Amino acid sequence: MIATNTSYLDVTRLAEGMRHPERLIGLHFFNPANVMRLVEVAAGTQSAATAVARCAALAKRLGKAPLVCRSAEGFVGNRIFAVYRSHVEFLLEDGALPHEVDAALTSFGFAMGPFTVADLSGLRVAWELRRRRRAEGRQTMRYVEVPDLLVAAVRTGRAVGAGYYAYPDLRQPQPDDAVRELIEGESHRKGIARRSITADEIVAGALGAMVREGAAAVREGVVATPGAVDVALVNGFGFPAWEGGPLWWAAHARRAEVDRALALAATAAGRVPAATVADLDDVLGGVG
């Protein structure tokens, strides 16, 4: 087997020109690899079934939880996390600050808030992805420049002592007035009237974004079942296990609550009309 630890690149394209493309497989370990249980086993169009089976078995021998999926940009976990991250960036322009978003989502049960995670992993990888998408004409309907401006200011995360937060001791994040001023300046530049955003709205919209994208991954055949989405988010991204994952949450919450979450996500992204829970019944009906 030839395995790549990429989290975004297409395994099928990487196999082009190989004499034995059936040997190539995606084997994406999550950081820190010695701690995180999730390993995505991503098959390209020519990956052999034996390659998938052997790599999944290897992950189990290492004490990991293998998640078999089809190769697609971001595979499963990073694809959904990218949409989640975009949603919380929309909230920055609309009126929230990084520490308010992080506090709301950790109170819901996430192991870490999204901006703390961004600083920990570093802002440059996501910046490279956004730059590639813009060059390919795949820019989202609403683009938030805040993270690009942070990278330009060499605020690329905790490793350099500055990102969405300041790190005076390179460990504990501290809200930074410079970041607040940058965010408020972007809202003003775009003519967005900042407003107070409640913790409940922050959580609901973030869940709606994940539910919508998770359902899309199932429909597109990137994963075989809704449960695979939930496994990825719980084991790879700190989604609260007692909530079961985004699709489990959507299948068991009150329908009006899910409809509100989907509507908030759609409004923030500039997508109209919003999906409703009824639109997702074909996916949510497969949740155990």
Image (cartoon, rainbow, N blue to C red):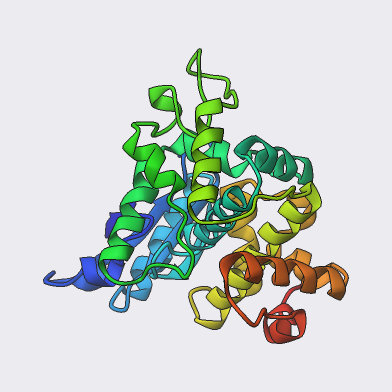
Q: Residue at x 46, y 40 (%)?
A: 31
> Looking at the rendering, which quadrant does residue 161 occupy?
top left
Q: Residue at x 50, y 80 (%)?
A: 221
> In the image, residue 55 lies at what x, y percent?
39, 59
Image-based side of 80 in relation to 95, left or right: left
> In the image, residue 242 lies at what x, y percent?
79, 51
**Rendered view: 216 above or below 75:** below
Q: Residue at x 48, y 74 (%)?
A: 222
Image quadrant where one finds the N terminus: bottom left
> In the image, residue 239 lies at what x, y percent?
67, 50
Extreme-top residue of the structure: 169
In this view of the protein, can residue 85 be seen by the observer? yes
**Rendered view: 64 above or below 150:** below
In this view of the protein, can residue 60 be seen by the observer? no
> In the image, residue 21 lies at what x, y percent?
21, 71
Image-based side of 234 in relation to 55, left or right: right
Q: Residue at x 75, y 44 (%)?
A: 109
Work out whether residue 159 or residue 20 is closer to the camera in this orientation and state it.
159
Work out whether residue 56 or residue 187 is closer to the camera in this orientation and state it.
187
Work out whether residue 22 or residue 209 is closer to the camera in this orientation and state it.
209
